[in-house]
Image (spheres, rainbow, N blue to C red):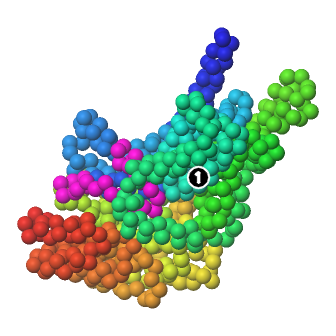
Amino acid sequence: MEVRRSRRRASFAIIFVILVLSAALRLYGLSWGLPDVFEEATPLNEAWKMWGWGPSGTLDLNPHFFNYPSLMIYCQFIGQGAMYLGMRLGGIVDSGIEYAALYVTDKTPFLILGRMITLLFGIATVWILYKVCSKIASPPAAYAAAFLLAVCAFHIEKSQVVEVDVPLAFFCLLALWFMLGIAEEPSRRNYLRAGAAIGLAVSTKYTAALLFIPLVTSHLLAVRIGRDRFGSGKVQKDRRSRWRLLAATTGIVVAVFFVTSPFVFIDATTSLKDLSLERLHMKEGHFGFEASGTAWFYFRALSERIIGWPLIIFAAGGLVYRAMLRRREGALVLASFLLSYAIAIGSWAMKADRYLLPILPVIVIFAAAGMEDIVRFSRIAAARRPWRAGSAAALFLAAVAPIALAYPQHLKQYAVDTRTLAREWIEANVPSGSFIATEAYGPDLLGPHTLFSLDRSTRAAALERTKDRPEYAVQPVPMLQVYPERSAAFYDPRLYQDVDIFITSSAVESRYRREPGRFRGQLAFYGGLEARCRKLIVFSASGGSGPTISLYEMQGGRAAFAGRRDIRGPAPLESSTLSGVEALFYKNLGVNYEAFRFYPEAVACYDLALGFETLRPSWYTDSVIGKARCLVAMGREDAAVSFLRSVVDRAPAPYIREHILRFGRSIQAGNR
């Protein structure tokens, strides 16, 4: 008994040290890039919109975003509410208006919060990996697996961004743990726990529905080996009851998914539209990754950047021996998930290394098991214990070496980003009120797009916080992930006649240059910049972080945009092929003209935006409200109210219709 307690204490101490190491590695550099934001942080941004901070905002629990489910959006939503309470109690902010102004002007605390949520899931994944590996391998192998994931630079990197894939990996591994329990002891408790975990995983990302394959596998294994004891301990002779239990588990999955992502069902029209766009994305692929095959892309990612050749070989050996040759129940369950998920992501045209995260822990588990098998069944196993320990250490070092070699590249992301350097140079050298067009992955500049969606009180508070920073008219140049050749319409020089500075980013330009025959329009635009415009400065990563950023002066010797009177206004797009983001482009352009009081030009932009179909209801809302604001600023309140009445019935959703009506009432009340 004392020996058993001693072993438990030692086991606890080892895994505790691994978890502390995991936390330390993920906390280091957590604030990378801030206060600039170089990640999409979609769950955070969508959660923020739900709060409706400010006196005119309304709380809306419908995220109106369903490219993936809502669980992580709600986690961010709850975190933002808790942080607001903490800031109020701590005297950091005095109201929701100040809190909203802080979000707009400096997202640092919100990004830290969001990244901490992902980080906690990353650490928990290390722990649950240890538990799962303990079911199919020895304790030393489980420690090795947990350590390998804890120090994996790729997993650390993804644990420091606000995305859904690290939480997805945790819930998938949690579900697999309960499924291994089903194969060992098919009790009601294990079935229902597995169903709840699957429901949470699917509510994190739709692809987790593939967990039904290992669920059925674990169920069939339990049936095959005759382990049909239920929680009561009584033997259930009626085989149909086992299938009823599997059906009940499916019901638990649906129920948990509904509770954590209810508006996927309630707002089915929007969710089906978003899902169709996501399916198109998966089918057509991601701009810039079309050249290589999907399977080759993931194989290279694993072997060159994520875990290295030794772990891949060990994992293959562990999978073949334990799942295919020995047919161990736990290994079969894990293998069914690993193989089905790998086949699924391998069938998509869309490729992203983060898609490997749900199966990365399973690969590491099989690798640890494979190393254990090599030591156990090699000739060295018959030798003395020191030689066995030495062989195990050699295998472990071979597994760790590629992961360690990835750290120099991993640490580069903590260096000052070229986009930060570009922003600082622009704020020091480019006059406030200049008009800047920028490609994607460019510097994060303060512009009217940041402020004009706010109500008057919040906008005033945000302006007070940024009074010492220059403000620019900032026009994003669309980059399309699907059908990227359609972005050629936005590389027309006529669209940027009022622009003072154009910013190119190698993260975009290099993709176009790789296929010159496909992107002639974009390359002709770059050639025009080089030939006719003065290159102000270039920020090159030089082995650091970020893309190469180049700044071009469109026309020299003229006043900044805000101080000019020779404004030409918007030009129509010369393209019969629509990309789907025309409305967004002109809406953003309208905001820039409106912010610097070029109201007729802004109205023309908003009219152009409303002439295109919108992929997002918010684009329609912003264009309608923007035009009404301009009419009011021009002293045409009656025309603004009349315009709102004429478009309210065309609103793409009831909540947008209410927003338009509310804005119309505020105009009539004179408190816009």
Where, quadrant-wise, is the N terminus in this rendering?
Answer: top right
Q: Quadrant of residue 639?
A: bottom left
Vertical placement of 441 versus 407: above or below?
below
Circle 1 crowding by C-alpha within 10 Å: few under 14, some 14–19, many from 20 = some
Where, quadrant-wise, is the C terminus in this rendering?
Answer: bottom left
Image side of residue 113 versus residue 543, left or right: left
Along the line of sight, which residue is nearer the eye, 84 or 250?
250
Q: Position of residue 172 (x, y in %)?
A: 57, 46
Q: Position of residue 30 (x, y in %)?
A: 49, 43
Vertical placement of 445 versus 366: above or below?
below
Which three-letter amino acid code belongs to the residue tagged 1?
Phe
Q: Which residue is mark 1?
A: 212
Q: Is residue 631 visible?
A: no
Q: Position of residue 507 (x, y in %)?
A: 55, 66
Q: Which residue sits at x=67%, y=65%?
A: 294
Magenta segment includes 66: yes
Q: Which residue sits at x=61%, y=18%?
A: 9
Magenta segment includes 630: no
| Dominant secondary structure (helix, strand or loop) of the stretch shown in magenta | loop
Q: Quadrant of residue 546?
A: bottom right
> Which portion, as a residue range, is magenta?
52-79
- Total of numbered circles in the picture? 1
Q: Which residue sits at x=48%, y=70%?
A: 276
Q: Is residue 143 visible?
A: yes
Along the line of sight, which residue is nearer the eye, 399 or 647?
647
Vertical placement of 377 versus 569: above or below?
above
Along the line of sight, which residue is nearer the eye, 96 or 657?
657
Q: Which residue sits at x=28%, y=56%?
A: 60
Secondary structure at badge 1 equals helix
